[in-house]
Image (cartoon, grey):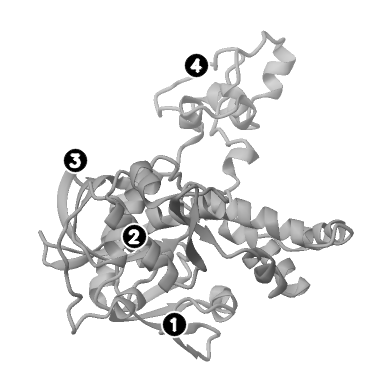
Amino acid sequence: MRNAEVIRQWKILKTIEAGRYTTAADLAGEHRVTERTIRRDIEALQEAGFPLYDDRADGRKVWRLVEGHKQRLTQSFTLAELAALFFGKNMLSFLGGAPFAQDLESAFDKIKEALPARSLPYLARIQELFSARPDPAKDYSKKQDVISGLIDATLHQRPAKIAYFSFNSKKTKEYTLDPYRLVYYRGGLYLYARAHEYGEVRTFAVERVQSIEVLDQQFEIPADFSVGEYARGAFGIAGGKPEAVELVFAAEMAGYIRERVWHESQSMEDRSDGSVALSLQVAPGWELKSWIKGFLPHVRVTKPASLRDEIARELAAARGAFVPLRPDQGARQGCHPHQLPRRHHGRRRREGPERQAAHLPPHAGREHRTGGEGPGERPDAGARLPRPGRIQGPVRPHPEVARPLHLQR
């Protein structure tokens, strides 16, 4: 696998910044590349604006970083800007397993050192007022080589061969990709890339890339393709060809819909009954369907018809998993005994005739004595008396079982 140039250059910069008298030969041995490659890396860093220069030490040519650059960097920020960066640490927590994670942690430690010591308790109190609630994050601690390879391939427009685990087929597949862009979305990293096997751009989850080989070739992004347009068509992360989608939300949810920008293409129209129509230009994929289902039963799809029919089929298929349970079924499904009717809760103790009679419905004794049709009795039951301790008539479920469960949105 080809070494990731960007990550190697970053490590070279860190080595030189540490103050070690480092030669090109030392760096080449450390990174297992040629001295010519190291010289190209240093030239790339110089062109990027890092003040590197060569010097002589013990008769050898070594590389150094201009002294004082750290002080100039900190002096170029105001205290308010440094405090804002300090607060921004929470927003970057998703990079916990990425290659730059340790450097980010170190950077924030230095920002903290640059702030006046007396201001830290004050800033800590302010920080308690603002927090970023992160989405469920993915662990990239074992994917640093993969991420490094993807950065290298994307930056230099080089094709890559990857082994990718597919959730649909439950198999690992081989793909040759032209990687266009790495995207962070809701705690995860994704790759927009053209898959040679399909001849189209698809979205790949980085954590499912098991291995990568960056090829010593180059590709060009087609002139008629825009990565930005592909991303704008996504309602979430999976891009695609956008279509006109129209949804109507009932008055109960209209206020909630109005207060957010759900997609940059959206437009809204208020209706006389209090409902609101939301129009979007998005790819109607699984993310859009999941979002729509979250508003049921207060939403309907007016177009496209194909999206409405697909959601209807999925809801019909799901009904079998959400059949309401009868009270007697609850015991078999693990309900708490106190949620069941009294007749299902253990064995009734033996009771005297007075207490037995108290449990009978008002008509039970009379109808059984006269041969009438009491609840649950056959017409020919005759004058057969009920067994002691058995309740006749319909069983009413415990109020805790009968009460529907309402979830707070």
Picture quadrant where residue 114 is located: bottom right
Asked if residue 248 can be seen in this view, the reply is: yes
The residue drawn where x is 50% and y is 18% is 383
N-terminal of the pair, mark 1 or mark 2, is: 2
Asked if residue 373 can be seen in this view, the reply is: no
- As helix, strand or loop, the secondary structure at mark 1 comes to loop
- Tell me the residue that label 3 is attached to: 171
The residue drawn where x is 44% and y is 62% is 185
Asked if disc 1 and disc 3 are in contact, CB closer than 8 Å, the reply is no
Please name the amino acid that badge 2 sits on: Arg
- Tell me the residue that label 1 is attached to: 264
* Vertical position of residue 186 compared to residue 387: above or below: below
- Tell me the residue that label 4 is attached to: 384
Label 1 – label 3 distance at C-alpha? 36 Å
Horizontal side, residue 291 vs residue 213: left or right: right
The x, y position of residue 323, in whole percent, is: 40, 44
Label 3 – label 2 distance at C-alpha? 42 Å
- As helix, strand or loop, the secondary structure at mark 3 comes to strand
Q: Can you tell which of label 4 and label 2 is closer to the viewer?
A: 2
Q: Can you tell which of label 3 and label 2 is closer to the viewer?
A: 2
Q: Which mark is residue 39?
A: 2
Q: Can you tell which of label 1 and label 2 is closer to the viewer?
A: 2
The local crowd at label 3, few if under 14, some if 14 to 19, many if 20 or more residues have their Cα within 10 Å, is few
